[in-house]
């Protein structure tokens, strides 16, 4: 695959990454309205945006690196590409959150051993394996721990099942359906597991999130060669995905009352969104391919990692300057959102992209790609 391969940049899917990150941001910062309001629904369900990232990850890695069922680059190059893409911004975001971590550790009177465990697990991307450590230092970073294990395993998954999976599209459908069923069966129980569970299997662990990643891989196998002649199929799938998610979120109380979990219910909606955006690739820019949405999508990784500590700093500064009680202020949220978007665009342009280019050159990945 060359660096000019159009599979590497699908505008609607890039925009979808921004919408997923924005949804997670709303979960952490959106002022909640009364129960039943749109803001309450968006805020309470925003954690689902992480699941959309996992489905997208499985889909895009397969489309970009193994469209024929065989890894197009050596495993070493694949893993180094992931390090160059994600490592520098991850470390910068963790450094940015250090003052908040120090403050919270003092308030919670964490022991030196606990602090050392948090630091070691976060810097080695192991925090998602331990529920008591997952959210101690820049909580959204737990999902990068999950993604790191997906990246480590992806070449081995392709080696094991790639040629079989990609030979017939219906095999991709079977993997996706089996993944949805597995998530529906196991996830509700894992959500209820506490920190005293003796096994590394709980709602935030990589083992628990495999079905979402495999659903994306199966979807890629099903749709890799699908290219509709017009926008209607893609637009219909996007609208169907949005409708499915809206219904799932609206019925989240009823879903919980049945002993189910919202995440497995939502994943089919995510798959429809990804399929619709894939079908819209190559069409004239517009809608989810609009330039400003794509730009925000390119900066979505920085937005995802920086939004939570940035919100913490904004609240701390507001509490110090004008007193407490402004957490639900819409004016404060608007200021915070503009600051988050502007600063992460700057981080993407001035830090993430230069460091990615530098590391890719250092690792020899530019020569390998061409």
Image (tube, grey):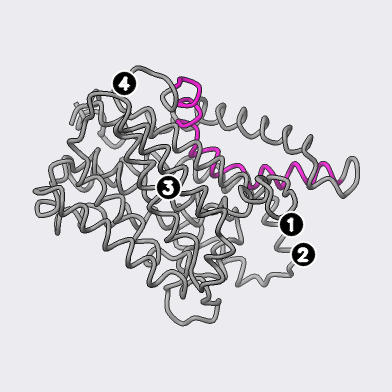
Query: What kind of element bears circle 2?
Result: helix
Give residue 293's position: percent from left, percent from top. Answer: 49, 26
**Quadrant of the frame with the N terminus:** top left
The residue to which callout 3 is attached is 53
Find the distance from the CA under tag 2 to the CA under tag 3. Answer: 32 Å
Q: Are marks 2 and 1 in contact (CB under 8 Å)?
A: yes
Identify whether 90 is placed above or below 367: below
Q: Are marks 2 and 3 in contact (CB under 8 Å)?
A: no
Say few, some or many: other residues with alpha carbon within 10 Å of mark 4 (under 14 / 14 to 19 / 20 or more).
some
Find the distance from the CA under tag 2 to the CA under tag 4. Answer: 53 Å
Q: Do the residues labelled 1 and 3 touch (CB within 8 Å)?
A: no
Image: magenta residue range: 290-319
Residue 297 in magenta stretch: yes
Find the distance from the CA under tag 1 to the CA under tag 4. Answer: 49 Å
Give residue 221's position: percent from left, percent from top. Answer: 20, 46
Sequence order check, earlier mark of 4 and 3: 3
**Residue 283, disc:** 4
Q: Could you say which is closer to the camera, residue 36 or residue 62?
A: 36
Identify whether 6 is placed above or below 117: above
Identify whether 149 is placed above or below 57: below
Query: What kind of element bears circle 3?
Result: helix
């Amino acid at each position: 695959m060359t660096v000019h391969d159009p599979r590497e940049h699908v505008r609607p899917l890039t925009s979808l990454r921004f919408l997923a990150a924005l949804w997670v941001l709303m979960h952490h910062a959106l002022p909640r309205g009364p129960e039943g309001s749109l803001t309450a629904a968006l805020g309470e369900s925003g954690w689902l945006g992480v699941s959309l990232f996992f489905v997208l990850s499985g889909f895009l890695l397969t489309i970009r690196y193994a469209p024929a069922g065989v890894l197009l680059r050596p495993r070493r190059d694949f893993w180094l590409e992931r390090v160059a893409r994600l490592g520098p911004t991850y470390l910068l975001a963790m450094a940015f959150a250090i003052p908040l971590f120090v403050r919270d550790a003092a308030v919670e009177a964490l022991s030196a051993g606990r602090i050392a465990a948090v630091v070691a697990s976060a810097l080695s991307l192991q925090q998602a394996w331990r529920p008591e450590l997952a959210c101690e230092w820049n909580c959204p970073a737990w999902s990068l721990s999950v993604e790191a294990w997906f990246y480590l395993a992806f070449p081995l998954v392709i080696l094991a099942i790639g040629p079989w999976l990609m030979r017939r599209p219906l095999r991709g459908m079977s993997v996706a359906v089996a993944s949805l069923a597995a998530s529906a069966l196991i996830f509700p129980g894992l959500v209820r597991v506490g920190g005293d569970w003796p096994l590394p299997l709980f709602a935030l662990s990589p083992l628990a999130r495999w079905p979402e990643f495999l659903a994306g891989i199966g979807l890629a196998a099903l749709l890799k060669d699908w290219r509709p002649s017009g926008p209607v199929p893609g637009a219909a799938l996007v609208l169907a995905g949005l409708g499915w998610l809206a219904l799932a979120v609206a019925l989240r109380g009823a879903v919980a009352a049945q002993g189910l979990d919202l995440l497995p219910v939502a994943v089919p909606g995510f798959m429809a969104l990804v399929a619709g955006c894939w079908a819209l690739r190559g069409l004239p820019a517009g809608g989810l391919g609009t330039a400003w949405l794509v730009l925000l999508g390119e900066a979505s990784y920085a937005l995802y990692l920086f939004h939570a500590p940035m919100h913490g700093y904004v609240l701390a500064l507001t509490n110090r300057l004008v007193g407490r009680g402004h957490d639900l202020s819409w004016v404060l949220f608007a200021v915070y959102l503009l600051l988050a978007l502007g600063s992460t665009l700057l981080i993407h342009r001035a830090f993430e992209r230069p460091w990615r280019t530098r590391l890719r050159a250092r690792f020899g990945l530019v020569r390998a790609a061409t």
